[in-house]
């Protein structure tokens, strides 16, 4: 199920202008000692803890929350709203809006449309800024379902 959801998110986000790298989250914002090793802006997908509810025949259902970690280059030396570089600094919010628009209604065979639930704006950054956008979907995982047995030669006719 997570593979299906990640693949759908990655395919959708790679249609957003400017995003050329989507990957699974692995605390990627903490590894910048030598600079970013991937193109920026990049989006990393983190699956939050999933609480499954068991259904019949091996199926299960859950609300699945994902965090999209959006990493981009920070604009240095902004000192006020009147600073001419402020327009460039605010472009990160345009990217977040484009990501939100792309994610709205994204659905798959076994998961419902994503809903935007939380936005966390980075306020402590140097060269790289990391904003987090959270989304929720409801999913039914059928990977463990047992095959249905069919019995042939029986009739439902009642005499």
Image (cartoon, grey):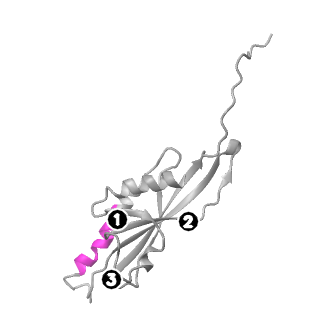
Residue 132 vertical placement versus 17 (above, below): below
> Along the polypeptide, which appears first: circle 2 or circle 3?
2
Q: Are marks 2 and 3 in contact (CB under 8 Å)?
A: no
Residue 44: mark in rendering: none
Task: Pick out the residue farthest to the top.
Answer: 159
Disc 2 versus disc 3: distance between alpha carbons? 27 Å
Residue 55 vertical placement versus 103 (above, below): above
Crowding at dot 2, Cα within 10 Å, few <14 / some 14-19 / many 20+, comes out as few
Q: Residue at x 49, y 51 (%)?
A: 4
Q: Nearer the viewer, mark 2 or mark 1?
A: 2
Q: Secondary structure at mark 3?
A: loop
Magenta segment main secondary structure: helix
Q: Secondary structure at mark 2?
A: loop
Residue 48: mark in rendering: 2
Q: Secondary structure at mark 1?
A: helix
Query: In the depicted view, which residue is nearer to us: 54 or 94?
Result: 54
- Residue segment shown in magenta: 86-98
Residue 16, image x and y in percent?
31, 59
Q: Are marks 2 and 1 in contact (CB under 8 Å)?
A: no
Q: Residue at x 37, y 54 (%)?
A: 12
Residue 23, image x and y in percent?
42, 63
Residue beneath label 1, please?
A: 97
> Along the polypeptide, which appears first: circle 2 or circle 1?
2
Residue 127: mark in rendering: 3
């Amino acid at each position: 199920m997570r593979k299906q959801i990640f693949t759908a998110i990655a395919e959708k986000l790679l249609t957003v202008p400017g995003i050329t790298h989507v990957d699974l989250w692995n605390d990627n914002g903490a590894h910048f000692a030598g600079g970013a090793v991937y193109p920026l802006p990049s989006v990393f997908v983190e699956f939050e803890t999933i609480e499954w509810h068991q259904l019949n025949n091996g199926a299960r259902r859950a609300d699945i929350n994902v965090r999209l970690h959006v990493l981009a280059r920070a604009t240095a030396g902004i000192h006020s709203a009147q600073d001419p570089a402020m327009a460039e600094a605010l472009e990160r919010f345009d990217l977040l809006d484009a990501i939100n628009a792309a994610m709205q209604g994204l659905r798959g065979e076994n998961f419902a449309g994503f809903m935007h639930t939380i936005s966390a704006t980075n306020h402590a950054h140097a060269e790289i800024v990391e904003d987090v956008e959270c989304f929720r979907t409801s999913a039914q995982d059928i990977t463990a379902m047992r095959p249905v047995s069919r019995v042939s030669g029986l009739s439902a006719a009642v005499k």
